[in-house]
Amino acid sequence: MVRNSVKGFTLVELVVVIVILGILAAVVVPKRVGLGSSARAASIQSLAGTVRTSVSLVRSLTAVRGAGTASPTLANITFVDLDSSTSMRVWSGYPDRWCDGIGVALLGSKVPAGGCYLSSSAVPGDDYTFYGYGNSQIPGGDAGWRIEKAPTPMQCSVQYTYNGSGVPVVKANTSGC
């Protein structure tokens, strides 16, 4: 008796090929589709929310604890202790526009040695770079953060606009992400 041998793939071989194609698709497709841009934009939106929350918390903290320790030389400037090692510069009840003000809103942000009052120099962090008021890196020269690796970093940023009166404005710019 002659047996006909059937040639083809087994079910296990087909499943292995499908799994391999799935893994390749999961790795390659996001890079081709441009999810990096979406991730950067989402990160900026998230940071803007964090900054808004920080502003509200500092305002609440100053309402409950008082204005903080007054500066001996600057009118309407106080310093509020956020924790045992971080003090924030507050201007008329809201975080000031320097790296020792709103710049310390991000957990883990550190003020450079020698301070940064009246400095618009870059203060690099893990994911974002902070620039104080009067810089040329954030739209309008406002204080804020940006993602340096973005295609257009200035337009992949969070602006913090505050002039000592009224309520600070936080704006997310994502068109350059």
Image (cartoon, helix red, strand yellow):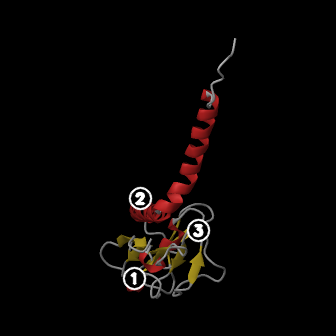
Label placed on residue 109: 3
User: Is residue 69 something that shows in the picture?
Assistant: no
Q: Tag 3: residue type?
A: Ser
Of 125 and 119, the residue lying toward us: 125
Q: Tag 2: residue type?
A: Val
Q: Position of residue 149 (x, y in %)?
A: 55, 73
Query: At x 59% / y 50%, what residue is drawn?
Result: 24
Closest to the camera, between mark 3 and mark 2, is 3
Label placed on residue 139: 1
Closest to the camera, between mark 3 and mark 1, is 1
Q: Are marks 2 and 1 in contact (CB under 8 Å)?
A: no
Dividing the picture into quadrants, the one containing residue 50 is: bottom left
* Residue under numbered circle 2: 64
- Which of the marked residues, 3 or 2, is nearer the chain's N terminus? 2
Q: Quadrant of the C terminus?
A: bottom left
Task: Work out how far the residue at label 3 is from the one at label 2, CA to CA, in angstroms.
Answer: 24 Å
Q: Residues within 10 Å of mark 2 (few under 14, many from 20)?
A: few
User: Is residue 177 something that shows in the picture?
Assistant: yes
Q: Residues within 10 Å of mark 1 (few under 14, many from 20)?
A: some
Q: Tag 1: residue type?
A: Pro
Q: Position of residue 99 (x, y in %)?
A: 53, 77
**Extreme-left residue of the structure:** 166
Q: Residues within 10 Å of mark 3 (few under 14, many from 20)?
A: some
Q: Are marks 3 and 1 in contact (CB under 8 Å)?
A: no
Query: At x 50% / y 87%, what residue is drawn?
Result: 73
Of 88 and 136, the residue lying toward us: 136
Find numbered disc 2 in the image and state the secondary structure of the residue it sits on. Answer: helix
Q: Are marks 3 and 2 in contact (CB under 8 Å)?
A: no
Task: Work out how far the residue at label 3 is from the one at label 1, CA to CA, in angstroms.
Answer: 22 Å
- Which of the marked residues, 3 or 1, is nearer the chain's N terminus? 3
Q: Position of residue 87 (x, y in %)?
A: 56, 69
Q: Position of residue 90 (x, y in %)?
A: 45, 73
